[in-house]
Image (cartoon, rainbow, N blue to C red):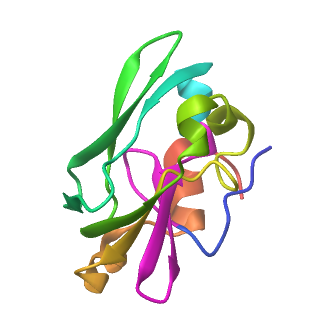
Amino acid sequence: MITYPEEFRYTKDHEWVRLDGEIATVGITDHAQQELGEIVYLDPPKLGARVEQGRMFCSVESVKAANDVFSPVSGEVVEVNEPLVNEPKELNQDPHGSAWLARIRLSAPQELDRLMTAAEYSTYVGVAT
């Protein structure tokens, strides 16, 4: 059974965000990677891009389908996890750890208040806590 990290916040579209000062690390949840199946391609966000909460900022493709990934926060992309471009399968292996997608400098920190806690997300996806 998966346990969702308590220090993260989650979206209904199955993205997570972890805050470190004014920088938010963003990724997809374990639930998302399970639903997608084997991930074979990542179209990462562009370094320096301005992103908005709830808007598409990158995409992933699996053997099943292509899916947009929506930014859980607004701000500027300050780092992209470049190794994932060549090894997108890492998203299946460590979605809450080394397989983060991007780091975003927040422009509206109050947006985090709109996201779910780990307990709320676990209930949302039907995982007992």
Q: Is residue 23 magenta-colored? A: yes
The image quarter in which residue 24 lies:
bottom left
Q: Which residue is at a point 67% across and 58% down the rendered structure image?
A: 4
- Residue 73 drawn above or below residue 66: below
- Viewer-nearest residue: 49 or 30: 49
Q: Is residue 21 left or right of residue 30?
A: left
For the C terminus, the quadrant is bottom right
Q: Residue extending furthest top?
A: 63
Front position in the image: 78 or 109: 78
Residue at the image position 74 percent from the left and 37 percent from the top: 93
Q: Quadrant of residue 79?
A: bottom left
Q: Position of residue 82 (x, y in %)?
A: 53, 46
Q: Residue furthest bottom?
A: 21
Q: Position of residue 18 (x, y in %)?
A: 53, 71
Q: Is residue 71 left or right of residue 88?
A: left
Q: Is residue 80 visible?
A: yes
**Quadrant of the drawing holding the N terminus:** top right
Magenta residues span 9-31
Residue 37 visible to the viewer: no
Residue 34: image location, x then y, percent:
62, 29
What is the count of numbered marks? 0
Please name the residue shown 58% across and 65% down the image: 118
Image location of residue 69, percent across then percent down: 35, 41
Magenta segment's dominant SS is strand
Q: Residue placed at 59% from the left, 65% from the top?
A: 119
Nearer-the-camera pick, 38 or 1: 38
* Left or right: 121 as drawn, with respect to 7: left
Residue 34 inside the magenta-drawn segment: no
